[in-house]
Image (tube, rainbow, N blue to C red):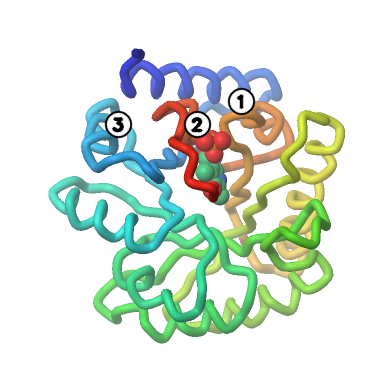
């Protein structure tokens, strides 16, 4: 079995190669290591390999890991679906949330963010595939959601996130990444100054980087395959 540190090095070299192949500056894409379902010791090993930003999908699991690793200077991103009755621990423990698709959840996070902490960094999740089953705000509703989220005092709106359709069709994926990038450009033409495009996972990171990703969310390629949970 390959070690986490070795896999992490390989992922970082893939990212650098993808940046270079589309003439993007080295280091313009950040790596978020998605540690969901893996134990705190795996996160510690990745940290020893130089990784500091980690993503979690489930509130209880994420908070338990954050507490177990409180001795390390880590940055924690919540990337899973978030129900409005589970916002408090996220507001109290995480640094970023990528999965905001409605105002109610954002309002609660802002109200529950402790005043002693810096603002929670926010990406709005956009449904770029149009699949009815997908979370994410419809592209048409995005300007109003962004404008409202921007006024919340304990949040800082940083950008957009998407999970494209599960397909090997490169052209379809490319169009969906372009939809997210275009949505970010339109918000920025309105003066929002957003700097984050959270898109790309283990199977499509090079494509996402060629379409402008600034942060890729990588689980399997670093930590290995997850045990099936009936829920990714
Ligand atoms: C699990 C997950 C990832 C990581 O996916 P891999 O294919 O394992 O790299 C990225 N983003 C989100 C939102 C996820 O739920």
Q: Quadrant of residue 29?
A: top right
Q: Residue furthest left?
A: 71
Residue 87 position within the rendered picture, expressed as x and y whole percent measured from the top left: 42, 75
Image position, residue 81 (x, y; %): 54, 63
**Label 1 with label 2: CB-CB less than 8 Å:** yes
Determine whether the beta carbon of the residue marked 3 sits less than 8 angstroms from the nearest atom of ligand 1. no
Horizontal side, residue 126 vs residue 176: left or right? left
Image point 58% across, 68% down: which residue?
A: 100
Q: Which residue is mark 1?
A: 19
For marks 2 and 3, give the CA distance: 18 Å
Reply above or below: 14 against 25. Answer: above
Write down the residue under mark 3: 46
Counting from the top left corner in percent of width and height, residue 60 is at: 33, 62
Q: Position of residue 109 (x, y in %)?
A: 44, 78
Q: Look at mark 2 in the image and give the residue it sits on.
A: 27
Q: Is residue 82 visible?
A: yes
């Amino acid at each position: 079995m390959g070690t986490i540190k070795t896999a992490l090095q390989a992922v970082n070299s893939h990212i650098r190669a993808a940046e270079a192949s589309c003439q993007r500056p080295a280091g313009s894409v950040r790596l978020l290591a998605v540690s969901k379902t893996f134990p705190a010791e795996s996160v510690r090993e990745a940290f020893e390999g130089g990784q500091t930003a980690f993503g979690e999908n489930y509130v209880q699991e994420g908070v338990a890991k954050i507490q177990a690793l409180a001795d390390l200077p880590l940055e924690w991103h919540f990337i899973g679906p978030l129900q409005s009755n589970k916002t408090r621990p996220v507001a109290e423990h995480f640094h970023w949330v990528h999965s905001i698709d409605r105002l109610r959840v954002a309002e609660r996070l802002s109200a529950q963010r402790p005043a002693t902490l810096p603002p929670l960094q926010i990406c709005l999740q956009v449904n770029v595939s149009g699949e009815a089953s997908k979370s994410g705000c419809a592209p048409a509703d995005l300007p109003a959601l962004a404008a409202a989220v921007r006024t919340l005092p304990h949040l800082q709106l940083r950008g957009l996130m998407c999970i494209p359709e599960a397909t090997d069709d490169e052209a379809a994926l490319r169009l969906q990444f372009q939809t997210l990038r275009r949505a970010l450009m339109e918000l920025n033409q309105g003066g929002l100054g957003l700097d984050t495009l959270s898109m790309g996972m283990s199977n499509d990171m090079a494509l996402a980087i060629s379409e402008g990703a600034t942060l890729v969310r990588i689980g399997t390629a670093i930590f290995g395959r997850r045990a099936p949970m009936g829920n990714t």
